[in-house]
């Protein structure tokens, strides 16, 4: 992360500030915390600390609640959104690892099984003889480019 990027998960806002930013009463934020809707981080002293992502969630809860959605439905929606966020972060991490691995092994090889069951190493760009060899594994480019 560069110096200019803001960590949207950093717990920086006290409850009064988060309430002001989300246009809610602090008691509403406490209730949402008890219900598990928007659960902030805690300091060592037990004070709630909200991140900018929490504030966005609070605004979303207010919007959805205003449109008539029930709090349990909102809780489920927020859980699913959090899961998507976690999975997106994991996919990005795995893509970075894959790129690093490919850069570390520029001569990565593809293997195939020969007609007799032997392992056959294929050169980069070599085609498999379909009648006699079966490809067991071939790395895929995560960005959709072919080698």
Image (tube, grey):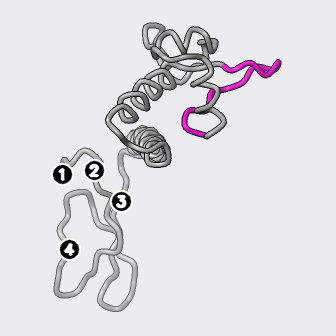
Measured as percent of width and height from the top left, residue 78 is found at 46, 41
Q: Residues within 10 Å of mark 4 (few under 14, many from 20)?
A: some
Is tag 1's residue or tag 4's residue first in the polypeptide sequence?
4
Is tag 2's residue or tag 3's residue first in the polypeptide sequence?
3
- Please say whether residue 90 is visible from this viewpoint: no
147 shown above or below 45: below
Measured as percent of width and height from the top left, residue 105 is found at 42, 46
Q: Provide the secondary structure element on which disc 3 rests.
A: loop
- Residues at marks 1 and 4 touching, judged by CB atoms closer than 8 Å: no
Q: Main secondary structure of the magenta part?
A: loop
Q: Magenta part of the protein: which range? A: 36-48
Q: Which residue is mark 1?
A: 146
3 shown above or below 89: above
Is tag 4's residue or tag 3's residue first in the polypeptide sequence?
3
Q: Which residue is mark 4?
A: 128
Q: Residue at x 60, y 17 (%)?
A: 26
Q: Provide the secondary structure element on which disc 2 rests.
A: loop
92 shown above or below 10: below
Q: Provide the secondary structure element on which disc 1 rests.
A: loop
- Residues at marks 3 and 1 touching, judged by CB atoms closer than 8 Å: no
Q: Provide the secondary structure element on which disc 4 rests.
A: loop
Left or right position of 110 against 21: left
Q: Which residue is mark 2?
A: 141
The residues bearing labels 1 and 2 have C-alpha atoms spaced at a distance of: 7 Å
Q: Residue at x 56, y 8 (%)?
A: 17
- Residues at marks 1 and 2 touching, judged by CB atoms closer than 8 Å: yes
Q: Residue at x 27, y 61 (%)?
A: 123
């Amino acid at each position: 992360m560069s110096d200019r990027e803001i960590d949207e998960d950093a717990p920086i806002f006290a409850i009064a500030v988060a309430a002001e930013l989300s246009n809610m009463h602090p008691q509403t934020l406490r209730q949402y915390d008890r219900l598990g809707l928007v659960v902030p981080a805690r300091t060592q002293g037990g004070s709630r600390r909200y991140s900018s992502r929490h504030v966005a969630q609070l605004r979303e809860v207010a919007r959805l609640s205003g449109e008539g959605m029930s709090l349990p439905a909102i809780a489920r929606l927020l859980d699913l959104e959090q899961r998507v966020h976690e999975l997106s972060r994991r996919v990005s991490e795995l893509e970075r690892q894959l790129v690093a691995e490919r850069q570390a092994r520029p001569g990565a090889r593809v293997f195939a099984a020969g007609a007799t069951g032997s392992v056959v190493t294929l050169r980069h760009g070599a085609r498999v003889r379909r009648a006699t060899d079966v490809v067991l594994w071939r790395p895929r480019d995560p960005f959709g480019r072919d080698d």
